[in-house]
Amino acid sequence: MRNEVPLALVTGASEGLGRAFAKRLAGDGYQVVAVARNEARLKKLVSELGDGGHSFLAADLCETAGVTEVAAALTSKHFDLLVNNAGLGRYGDFATSDELHSQQMIRLNCEALVMLPRAFIENAHEGDALVNVSGVLGLLPVPGMSVYAATKGFILSFSQALWHEQKERGVYVMALVPGPIATEFKSRSGGAADKGPPAAITQTPDQVIDRAMKQLAKRKRPVVMAAARRARLIFSLFRRMPRKSVMRIMAKFH
């Protein structure tokens, strides 16, 4: 039985793209369950979403207990939409990086991203949808962000296979591939102030969500490129260039 009011769970909802997703979905008539680690930010977000029975769940998806708690919430009732947005990145050479940071990236960007869809699909009905947020860095090897880029590549591969597996059931799976977004990601990930993508290829969270929601309504493409037009052109060119040349270019920005 479908919900009278569509129900969506959004991870990584306390800031950036996840926060913008929660606000857009609430505005579109969804009842939102916002998930993140920061309870204070979640409370503030839910207060801004207005009436509609919105709620939050404070959970650390880098930890098994947090994943178990959110998975239990997904199996306790029927959700129409899961936005698997939570992610973690760190700048720096792999050999000298903190081992814990690499483990956390894999746990959050890969392990949690696999386990939550399993729980969601258990109760999924025809017409429901799952959005896994990847990124353009998942298309290429990225020196200085080797583990992060690899996890985003994992999301792309996993999501496309899952799209094929679930299409007969009528459950739509989208791999959302944003380009650079104007959020706190860079500063929180240890990025240098003088490096990073040019402003000309950077988008706002709302611009990314506009693209995602348009394709969510169509429910056709397994991969939705939500990068700015210039970014799409650049990465299309990169995919035709020798990998060594691409890595030299990418290393300058990371």
Image (spheres, grey):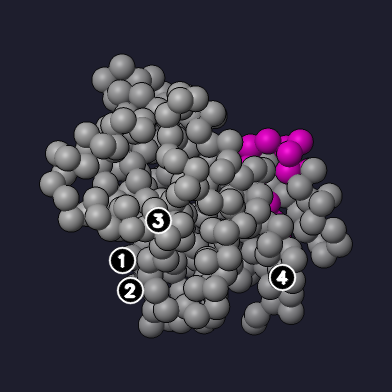
Q: CA distance from mark 3 to mark 4?
A: 29 Å
Give me the residue at 24% from left, 55% from top.
237
Q: Nearer the viewer, residue 149 or 163?
A: 149
Label 3 sits on residue: 230
Q: Which amino acid, by three-letter code, is at mark 4? A: Asp
Q: Which badge, 2 or 4, comes first in the chain's sequence?
A: 4
Element marked by disc 3: helix
Q: Which badge, 4 or 1, comes first in the chain's sequence?
A: 4
Label 3 with label 4: CB-CB less than 8 Å:
no
Give me the residue at 42% from left, 78% from top.
220
In front: label 2 or label 4: 4
Label 2 with label 4: CB-CB less than 8 Å:
no
Indicate the quadrant where residue 65 lies: top right
Q: Is residue 223 above or below residue 250?
A: below
Label 4 sits on residue: 28
Highlighted range, magenta: 32-43
